[in-house]
Amino acid sequence: MTEATTPRQGLEPVLDPTDTPVPVEVVDGELVIDLRDGVVEVAPPPGLVVTEAVRRPRRVPPALTLVLLVVAVVWLVWAGALGAALVVAAVLGSIAAHELAHLLAARAVGVGSKEFFVGFGPRLWSIERGGTEWGIKAIPAGGYVKLVDEHDAAPWRKTVIALAGPMANLAIAVLLIVGVSAAGQLPTATGTSGDLPLGERVTVGAERFADAANASVEPMLQLPSTIASMGRAVATGDDVPADSDRLVSPVGIGRLADQASGAGWYVAVLLIAVINLALGLFNLLPVPPLDGGRVLAAAGEAVGSRLRHRRVVLTGKAFERIGIAVVGVLLVASLSALVLDLLHPLGNPFGG
């Protein structure tokens, strides 16, 4: 790898006024140029062809990022919504923890990583460390991690990577519930967990997590009918009961966060725990492109490899089509949830 600022093999680079070095490499008789923040024009020597030019998206100026952050914080304090914003930030942090668990598990089993970002859209900030670009993007609607050659990894490695994310969310949920119970704030049949010895508080918290997990399994299995009923409600304009069980959009989560923060800090913490529980169980559903679907595909590769006595990698179009269909259903569900949250918001489940 050379830098375009150092002419090589007859190249005559012309950089933009920022004079940013641009990596140039000759691969298999072809000139490969990686356009990052600079712009380069080259005259390749005879026999070389420019075959790839990759430009990263422009970053939002750091000064503008800082100004927007300060304005957002001032507005939240003025509007009295700082508590709700902190809950939403904690939810985004839980999503980031899910993706970070994928990345750490990948590294543990020998699979590299390229990118780790919280958010989507334009980059607000990023830094490269250990061969991975870490950063924050403008739209706080989740996050992602991009791995290197995960497709070629052994089935057991794929399984470890896929399970790491949901397990992180479930671990966060149990720790938060047990923490609230240990702090004496978990409601019980006779009062609160504060009436119990510390050891029993931890036990009650763990049992409450198990009860919540068991109670969440049936709604997860009924998810298709729930999505269908939400779609019908949006299409027909029928009223939806304020206490109905349905999916919520980011708007609904923000409203719940505001209600929870007004009911007490421990209620807000329990809401974060429940969201983590839902994230973990939802991602374990055995359908592509969810983590459970990736585990199922890895199991299919392992069985196929054993039966055929050779390496089998599932890359069939059937999995891709199923994944596209699932994404489409989730998109419809998300849009339906948004419409319902705007037109028929859920009632306050925290008694306010």
Image: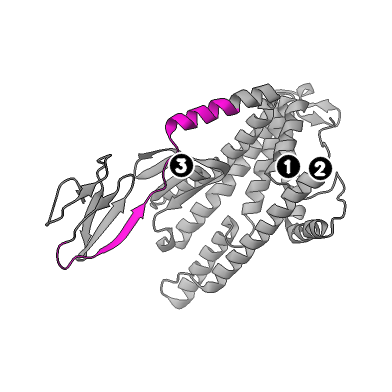
Q: Can residue 202 be seen in this view?
A: no
Mark 2 lies on a secondary structure that is loop
Q: What residue type is labelled 3?
A: Arg
193 w.r.t. 50: above or below = above
132 w.r.t. 301: above or below = above
Percent x, y for residue 190?
86, 28
Of all residues, the one furthest to the front in this rendering is 17
Percent x, y for residue 347?
84, 39
- Within 10 angstroms of label 1, few (less than 14), some, or many (20 or more) residues? some
Quadrant where the C terminus is found in the figure: top right
Q: Which residue has dot 1 on it?
A: 252
Q: What residue type is labelled 1?
A: Gly
Tell me how far mark 2 sits from mark 1, CA to CA.
8 Å
Q: Is residue 77 visible?
A: yes
Mark earlier in primary sequence (2, 1):
1
Q: Which amino acid does label 2 sit on?
A: Leu
Q: Do residues under tags 2 and 1 come within 8 Å of each other at their CB atoms?
A: yes
**Is 341 left, or right, of 54 in this rendering?**
right
Mark earlier in primary sequence (2, 3):
3
- Magenta region: 45-72
Q: Which residue has dot 2 on it?
A: 346
Mark earlier in primary sequence (3, 1):
3
**Is 331 left, or right, of 23 in this rendering?**
right
